[in-house]
Image (cartoon, grey):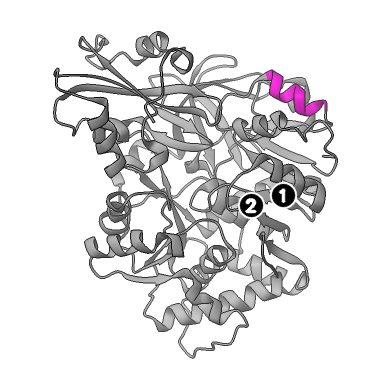
Amino acid sequence: MSSTLIDIFKWWAIDRKDVAAIVTAKDQITYSELDQWAEAVANWLISEGLKRGERVTILATNSMEWIVLSQAVMLAGGILAPVNPRFTVSEVAYMVGERYQSKFIFHDTSRAELAAGTQAEVANCAVFNISVIDQFRRGSLVSDAARPDIGLDDEVVIIPTSGSTGHPKGVVYSHRSLSSYVSETALAEPYSIDKAKVLLFGPLCTSAGYVVTTQYLAYGGTVFVEEAFEPLRAIQMIQEHGITVMMGAPIFFERMAASDSFATADLASLRYCLVGGARVSNQLLETWLAKGVTLRQLYGQTEAGGQATVNSRAAAVNSPEKCGRGSAFTRIAIVDDKGEFCGPNTPGEIVIKGAGIMTRYWNDEAATAKTLVKGWLHTGDLGMVDEQGLLTMLDRLKDIIISGGINISAAELERVISEVQGVEEVAVIAAKDDAFGETPLAIIYGNKDLSVEAIIAHCNTHLSGFKVPRYVVLEPQTLPRLATGKIAKPALRSKYANAHVELSKVR
């Protein structure tokens, strides 16, 4: 791969200049309009002092401006460093100040107070309402300032990931890794991505949002950007616009299938549907197949662009429980606890080697060295590969709760809850949830004065709302332990397997 993302987008700005690049509920722009707007904003960013490699944070929900600004940062040579807009001040300040040292924060109107609170805690960070870029929509700003010479190994974006530690890590992608990631699907699924119309509701601050948007703009497709997921609207969008591509966690497809309009909906336009991030039931696959839509289970994680496997239509139908295999640039393998490669159908840790994986964790050499070993990305997930190279994902070794398609780090919740006076032991596990698939359950041992109300109040102050546990159990005895001294989460998962029907939600 010898072209940067900038080269690719510039090509489409001419070849598909009048084709819609981005469509939102209220607006749309063509490829030529996107290029002109992003160019003018890039000139403005440079005039405001942005230097090559400096970080720019976006603190906003999905919007047209979000995508245009992300393109402009790339053109100006900056590094995009988005943050989840649902974070609290302390969470944003940690990411923007301690981790990224961002030059600018751009926020939407709803996050003005959050941005101001963050600015009060972070030095040398300018704050703008993201609507400031609207003045450059017609591409009116021209600058004589020299643009940096962008190469394949220049870094483009830092995507935060929950990981298995108490604080989010930052996954770094370069032009080379993203261009290779884009090319791989183009080789494996040329029919599926030709003149694609992709329905996107993943948050742009995640790989499910930013990477997918970048990928389909690089294909010259049209990205229909939704601010949030709503099942009836998703079905309406598919039918109204002839959506060809859609992807998401199982809960999204389950909610669509459960809606009143699913049975009569015409979904014939869908030709490439990917589902992953949690275990996919055969019932869900069969429900969609009955509508003529093959859901292709994938395996991936943020460190691998979000999608590490390619699942052919035939494999998805014949082996629906499997996640596909590595493609032209990617190898999938299994290793044992000694790091030795395993034979077919032998469980072990999933490892990935490919040009599309992350370059590193931002400012975290120790975590990078532990995760990237001899060119292999160690995922921390348990799986096995059959004789045809098809991967079956068995379980998560990393302690992640996937709620509504969003990763929540159990370790982060445990760190915050342990700060509450009187808490002596805490374990956070996933409880089933009809709306979100999973939701956090906190199991706590502490002194007799400890209250659920105090725990929730502390969490509300220091955690985003979606992370705050919906179930809390105060155990009268110390929590079970493994021989290693670690809390025995498998025993707790077994004990509270039916928490969603046996316990009452605390919020």
Say if residue 225 shows up in the picture: yes
The kind of secondary structure element at disc 1 is helix
Please state which amino acid type lies under the numbered disc 1.
Ala
Q: Examine the structure image and report whether residue 286 is included in the region drawn in magenta.
A: yes
Q: Which residue is denoted by mark 1 in the rendering? A: 186
Extent of the magenta region: 282-290
The kind of secondary structure element at disc 2 is helix
Residue drawn where x is 14% and y is 30% of the image: 421
Q: Which mark is residue 120?
A: none
Q: Which residue is denoted by mark 2 in the rendering? A: 182
- Specify the quadrant of the image occupied by residue 102: bottom left
Q: Residue furthest bottom?
A: 144
Q: Position of residue 368 (x, y in %)?
A: 35, 43
Residue drawn where x is 76% and y is 53% of the image: 196
Label 2 Cα crowd, 10 Å radius (few <14 / some 14-19 / many 20+): many
Q: Are marks 1 and 2 in contact (CB under 8 Å)?
A: yes
Please state which amino acid type lies under the numbered disc 2.
Val
